[in-house]
Image (tube, rainbow, N blue to C red):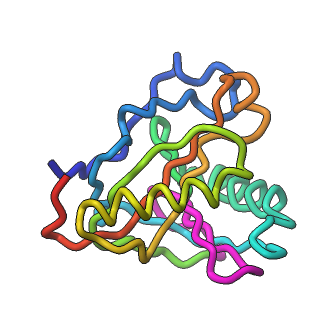
Amino acid sequence: MINKEIPAFTPEDNVTGCCPKFHPGHWEEKLFDFSAYTFIKGHSASLFYMPLNLDKVMTKVMTDILAAKANFEDKMLTLSQDLSPFKTEHLFLVQHEVKGYKLHRLEGLFFCKVYDGPFKNMTEWMKDFDEVLRLKGRKLEEVYAYYTTCPQCAKVYEHNYVVLLAKVDPKFEL
């Protein structure tokens, strides 16, 4: 089954007033089509994939989204993709235009796998994700990461969930 709706959260999920509680079952080994949604882009600097200014980029773009009232009340999604060891692109879900940003669509189907733990496990998670896809007859190519909570909220919720999403062809089967 292809999910065309981004999973929503309820007011009860937003315990911290910052990041809502993440429900891994809504994402684990699911297929998503995000083509009905719009995103704006932000970029952060990295040093061999370690973020350098991510907090400033996230804060600025989210401030701009909130000022434009372009956020969803019950959905949140920011997808990150390493473009190189020194630059990461972030796609922020928005309802409409935000001054100073171009709107983008994310076309195609995306297969998701949820991981939990410290960010230092990303290499291990990528190897596992590659193996999961290989067993399904696919190669790990275009990959995004959805960091579901900020570090402070991850401490409160006692989980640091990260969703890896791989673009797959329309014939992909779960």
Please report the bounds of the magenta region as a residue range.
79-100
Q: Residue at x 72, y 31 (%)?
A: 153
Q: Would you say residue 87 sits in the magenta stretch?
A: yes
Question: Looking at the image, is 11 positioned above or below residue 27?
Answer: above
Q: Considering depth in this image, is 129 or 32 the residue closer to the camera?
A: 129
Image quadrant assignment for residue 165:
bottom left
Q: Considering depth in this image, is 171 or 140 the residue closer to the camera?
A: 140
- Could you tell whether 41 is left or right of 27 in the image? right
Q: Residue at x 20, y 52 (%)?
A: 174
Per the picture, the main secondary structure of the magenta-coloured stretch is: strand
Q: Considering depth in this image, is 106 or 146 the residue closer to the camera?
A: 146
Number of callouts:
0
Q: Would you say residue 92 sits in the magenta stretch?
A: yes
> Where in the figure is residue 142, as x and y percent of width and height?
44, 75
Question: Looking at the image, is 3 positioned above or below residue 93?
Answer: above
- Could you tell whether 59 is left or right of 94 in the image? right
Image quadrant assignment for residue 138:
bottom left
Q: Residue at x 33, y 57 (%)?
A: 111
> Where in the figure is residue 37, as x and y percent of width and height?
36, 61
> Where in the figure is residue 59, as x and y percent of width and height?
77, 54
> Where in the figure is residue 133, as x and y percent of width and height?
33, 62
Q: Residue at x 62, y 81 (%)?
A: 83
